[in-house]
């Protein structure tokens, strides 16, 4: 079975967020333990598994995502990676519909090679700063928002871009303070550099100490920063070591996420299901 490693939210290899992609030949998923074992072996922040659905179904492909330790309810970068593989191999063109745990998602390919994902907008609920969060991050939050059931993160607003870039969090404490993880964010110091806000994502509870570029987090960051900056079209820079850009477009209950991707490894999974 073919397995591909795709760098997402970037147009250059070895940057952005890598994801494993396996397009299954069957019309069902193997058992969960097998999927989890493969994702653990791949050992990237997400590995995506997809199989084609019959004609007339509500979507074209069924899609699931696994971290090295658990299945996720929603994932942006591995969806982008899957759409990139479908488009570049000729398995699909135009808009692809996926059915996933969080509902129907679409991915639309463009002539320049970018892909736009249509995801549900995360509902933001202001919360008091959890006790110990500032100490765990090494920076005092300006505000904290819960992101709802699909994501399960805390969006933590910090003072400035330099503070976000300089974080060295206590990950064991971070794991205790959120359902999935913490998204630290601040306005861009200089928007002329091509991005409007920065973020970093820490998800030790699901086996990811720091995610290079988190597409799903931008379904929360888009409404958060659109409300503050007064624009629905924004660009976020996830300021991890690998770094990546996510272009966001807020459309009420839906958020569009646009990015590039590049396949860096195309190999064969030797162990059969």
Image (cartoon, rainbow, N blue to C red):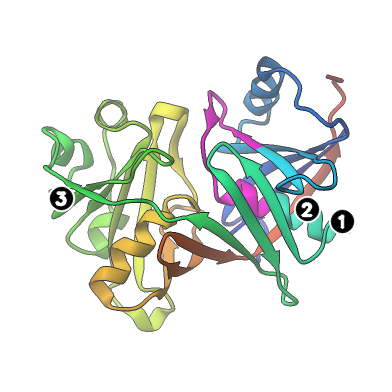
Residue 217 on image: x %, y %: 42, 51
Residue 64 vertical placement versus 193 (above, below):
above
Q: Classify 105 as above or below 109.
A: above
- Residue occupying image coordinates x 83% and y 57%: 92
Q: Is residue 56 magenta-colored?
A: no
Report x, y in % for residue 11. 65, 66
Classify 253 as above or below 63: below
Q: Is mark 3 on a helix, strand or loop?
A: loop
Residue at the image position 75 percent from the left and 26 percent from the top = 29
Answer with left or right where residue 171 lies relative to residue 144: right
Secondary element type, mark 2: helix
As helix, strand or loop, the secondary structure at mark 1 comes to loop
Q: Are marks 1 and 2 in contact (CB under 8 Å)?
A: yes
Total tally of numbered discs in the picture: 3
Quarter of the rendering occupied by the C terminus: top right
Residue 272 location, x and y as percent?
87, 20
Q: In this view, does 207 lie to the left or right of 17?
A: left
Lower position in the chain sequence, tag 3 or tag 1: 1
Q: Which of marks 2 and 3 is in front?
A: 2
In the rendered structure, which segment of residues is drawn in magenta?
Answer: 64-81
Residue at the spot of label 2: 85
- Circle 3: is it few (<14), some (14-19), or many (20+) Cα within 10 Å? some
Q: Residue 40 carries which label?
A: none
| Residue farthest to the front, as pictured | 56
Residue indicated by mark 3? 141
Judge whether residue 75 is colored magenta.
yes
User: Label 1, on which residue?
Assistant: 89
Quadrant in the picture for residue 224: bottom left
Q: Where is residue 193 in the image (x, y as percent from the top left)?
A: 41, 79
Taking the view exactly as shown, the residue that stands out farthest to the bottom is: 192
Q: Residue placed at 88% from the left, 34% from the top? A: 25
Using the numbered discs, state the Cα–Cα distance from disc 3 to disc 1 in whole angstroms: 45 Å
């Amino acid at each position: 079975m073919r397995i591909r490693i795709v760098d997402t939210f970037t147009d250059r290899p070895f940057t952005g967020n890598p994801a494993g992609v396996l397009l299954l030949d069957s019309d069902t998923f193997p058992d969960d333990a097998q999927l989890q074992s493969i994702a653990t072996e791949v050992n990237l922040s997400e590995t995506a598994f997809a199989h084609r659905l019959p004609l007339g179904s509500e979507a074209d492909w069924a899609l699931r995502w696994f971290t090295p330790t658990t299945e996720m309810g929603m994932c942006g970068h591995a969806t982008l990676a899957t759409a990139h593989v479908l488009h570049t191999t000729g398995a699909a063109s135009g808009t692809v519909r996926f059915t996933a745990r969080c509902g129907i998602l679409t991915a639309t390919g463009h002539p320049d090679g970018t892909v736009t994902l249509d995801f549900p907008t995360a509902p933001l609920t202001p919360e008091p700063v959890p006790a110990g969060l500032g100490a765990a991050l090494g920076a005092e939050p300006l505000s904290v928002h819960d992101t709802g059931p699909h994501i399960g993160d805390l969006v933590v607003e910090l003072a400035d871009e330099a503070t976000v870039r300089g974080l060295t969090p206590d990950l064991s404490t971070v794991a205790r303070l959120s359902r999935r993880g913490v998204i630290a964010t601040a306005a861009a110091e200089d928007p002329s550099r091509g991005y409007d806000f920065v973020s970093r994502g820490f998800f030790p509870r699901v086996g990811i100490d720091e995610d290079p570029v988190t597409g799903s987090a931008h379904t929360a960051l888009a409404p958060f920063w659109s409300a503050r900056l007064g624009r629905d079209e924004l660009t976020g820079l996830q300021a991890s070591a690998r770094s990546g850009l996510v272009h966001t477009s807020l459309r009420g209950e839906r958020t569009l996420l646009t990015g590039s991707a590049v396949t860096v490894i195309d190999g064969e999974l030797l162990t059969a299901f």
